Amino acid sequence: MSEVVEPPRFSAELRARTRGDHAEAQHSPYVAAMLGGKLSRAGYAEMVAQQYFAYSVLEEAAQVMRADAVGRRFVLPELSRVPALAEDLAYLLGLDWRERITPSPATLRYLARMRQVCFDWPGGFIAHHYTRYLGDLSGGQIIQRCVVRAYQLPGDRGASAYSFPLIKNVKRFKDGYREMLDLLPFDPAEQRRVIEEAIVAYRHNIEVFDDLGRDLPAYLVA
């Protein structure tokens, strides 16, 4: 009798298929400068601003997904980032921060893609949700430590979007998140669609960092 080979878990396949794009986003010149403490405070604030625009659309989509039997599984209040990003921008830029930020061309394309797929396709919402929040729960913790040290931020002010006070055990939460992915009622074709959309999401993130990188010389500190 031949041995039955179990197909890979969806969460594992999603992670494997997006690993390269995730790594590329993490190793952009802009991110390298930030992690190395070579980025000015203004340069860091510009990244926070672009994240604010992205999360505003994604969390707007989450409110729509509350009415969807599948999408609502990933509407998780523990992950809400927009209020923290607003607080960070107020600290970094001042009370008039809303008048001082604009989405970059790459961010505008990213927002347009999320509006196209995240509001009426649960798989698209989940794909973009995965790329953003799982990244914050992993590499985002490293970014927070680096920027708190580089800009001498009191507590986590200016970097509070990387804190998740409602999550007591990050590893357990991430494990539970991956279990939810594995339990999704998606057939193989839909799983492939979600994976491809996650790759698209990562590509948009890379383009956002590329846009930020074009102004990198002005943001570097001696």
Image: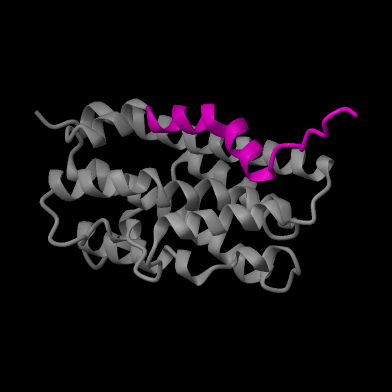
Give 177 or 108, whichever is nearer the viewer.
177
Q: Position of residue 102 (x, y in %)?
A: 40, 50
Task: Name the quadrant of the C terminus.
Answer: top left
- Vertical order, 199 against 153 (above or below): above
Q: Is residue 61 left or right of residue 34?
A: right
Task: Name the quadrant of the N terminus.
Answer: top right
Residue 21 seen in the current view? yes
- Vertical order, 206 against 41 (above or below): above
Q: Position of residue 14 (x, y in %)?
A: 63, 39
Give 183 or 210, whichever is nearer the viewer.
183
Q: Is residue 2 magenta?
A: yes
At x 40%, y 33%, the residue is: 26
Residue 36 occupies which quadrant of the picture? Answer: top left
At x 37%, y 43%, the residue is: 139
Q: Is residue 50 magenta?
A: no
What span is in magenta? 1-27
Residue that lies at the very extreme toward the front in this rendered image = 1
Q: Position of residue 165 (x, y in %)?
A: 34, 69
Give 110 or 21, whichever is nearer the viewer.
21
Q: Position of residue 3 (x, y in %)?
A: 82, 30
Residue 39 occupies which quadrant of the picture? Answer: top left
